[in-house]
Image: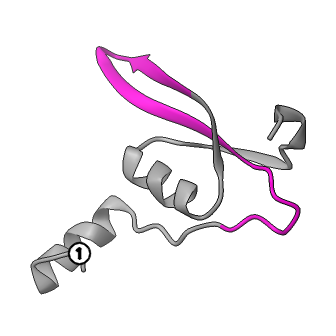
Amino acid sequence: MAIEDTKTTTEIGSSRELNQYLQSGWTLILSYTKHEHDTQEPCFVIGWQNDDEPVYPELLDRWERQEMMKDTGSLG
């Protein structure tokens, strides 16, 4: 699809999140590295280019993932 077909965009900061969005139908538009205070972070701009409403995957934050690992020993 062409960039003009993009209905909405969002920026995410991890490859784990990127993969979940791509599996939900989003398209990778741009990737870059953010440099701050001697650190580097990956950044991804993704776009929704389908005619239906955007699908936002349910994402667990870092604290939630750690709590699940404590409780179950896994993320599954």
Quick check: is 46 in the magenta stretch?
yes
Q: Amino acid at mark 1?
A: Leu
Query: Where's residue 67, x and y in %?
Result: 22, 75
- How many badges with numbers are in the image? 1
Residue 1 sits above or below residue 69 on the image = above
Quarter containing the N terminus: top right
Report whether 47 appears left or right of 71: right
| Residue under the image location 56 percent in, 57 percent down | 21
Judging depth in this view, the residue of 53 and 34 nearest the camera is 53
Residue lying at the far bottom in this picture: please name it: 72
Residue 4 sits above or below residue 49 on the image = above
| Residue under the image location 40 percent in, 68 percent down | 60
Report whether 75 appears left or right of 26: left
Q: Which residues are magenta?
A: 31-55
Quarter containing the C terminus: bottom left
Give the residue pinned by disc 1: 75
Q: Residues within 10 Å of mark 1 (few under 14, many from 20)?
A: few
Residue 14 sits above or below residue 70 on the image = above
Residue 16 sits above or below residue 70 on the image = above
- Predominant SS along the magenta part: strand
Judging depth in this view, the residue of 23 and 58 nearest the camera is 23
Residue 15 sits in quarter: top left
Query: Where's residue 70, x and y in %?
Result: 12, 77
Query: Where's residue 63, x and y in %?
Result: 29, 65
Quick check: is 70 in the magenta stretch?
no
- Element type at mark 1: loop
| Residue under the image location 34 percent in, 22 percent down | 40
